[in-house]
Image (tube, rainbow, N blue to C red):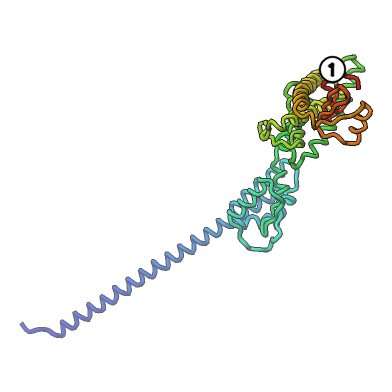
Amino acid sequence: MAFNFGAFVGGMSRQIVADIEREEQYELKMKGIAETEAMRQRAARAGERRKKQAALEASVGALKFLGYNDQAAAAIARQGEYAVGLAQNIGEQAMKKGVDVNTIYSMPNIDSDVEVGSKDMTETVNAAKADAPKISTSVMGLDTEAYKNLFAEPDKVESSYSARLAVISQKLARNPERADADALKTEQTQLLSDLRTMKEAEREEKGTVTPSFDLGSITSNTNEIRRGQLNRYGFDVGVDGQIENLTEGNMHKADLAELEVANQLNIRNQGIEDPNMKLAAQGIRESAVRNLNEYGWNTYYNKKDRLKKAPSNEAFVSSMKQGEYRQGQVVTVGNKVILYTGVPDFRTGQPFIVLTPDMDM
């Protein structure tokens, strides 16, 4: 059988044409798939943009509802979810307290597109919560002092003078150097004055007065005064009220401080005449006097050659007025032995203790 070259060539040509057509169809199919994927991706991106825009508009709307002005609301919303959440929290708190939120949260660079990360925001908020000095950031103008005050818990309104005075004393005893110490002391003075006025009216009406201070209030007042006096005499006082640097050589100074405590408790009680406070002051005074008597006699017997001597009562008083004696110094006046305390005793009114039975001064 003879080979039909024409048929062979014809068949090969048809095959080549078929292959080319299949390749073209494949390319068209791939192109169609690629175009479809690109369209899908474009659609997805457009959808994401719409979602973000919707979220942005919703955030702006919520912030404006909370009182932020248009520019501040838009600028905050551009910073992301963290910033919006923080601003909403601040706005809600400001709304509750009737505060203009724009005084708490301002935007100094409102036209800026600078992004603020969560780390920056966290540091700013933590600074505010830690009672740090007022700061402002370059983008998020958070007035940290106003922020702190906005979220500060209000002082509890106490039901009695005694309770409020106890709270003030507790605060001052824990930290005498606190930022609001002067304000607390002013309130304390006013409360004591008001209490005196009330008790005076009660005495005029009934002839007697009811107790004004309970045990807790007396303890708080005592601890406040004691810490202050111990510090003044050079003692370090721990959080539990214990003296941390008490030695045998300075024990008498702690007793001198106790005399001051008794004296100041008595001063606070003047015009109020609370029997419980009076008993507390007397007990503290008597304990201090006993200890100082022991210290005075030990000094007298062990340091006779170094004792101060005054020829007469008048000379003693004159030297005392001129500041010639130091606190804790033992002085002999004739046969009398006297310990100079420098603290006016609320029982005798004198800044000294006579150690001998002869009390004639």
> Residue under circle 1?
357
In the displayed structure, 155 sits above or below 8; it is: above
Crowdedness of circle 1 by 10 Å Cα count: few (<14), some, many (20+)? Answer: few
In depth, the one of 288 and 140 nearer the eye is 288
Quarter that holds the N terminus: bottom left
Q: Mark yes or no: residue 97 visible.
A: yes
Q: Residue 344: horizontal and vertical position, in percent?
A: 86, 28
Amino acid type at mark 1: Pro
Quarter that holds the C terminus: top right
In depth, the one of 173 and 52 nearer the eye is 173
| 126 with respect to 181 (left or right) | left
Q: Mark yes or no: residue 191 visible.
A: no
The furthest residue to the top: 207
Q: Residue 119: horizontal and vertical position, in percent?
A: 58, 54
| 68 with respect to 49 (left or right) | right
User: What residue lies at 66% left-to-right and 31% top-to-bottom?
Assistant: 240
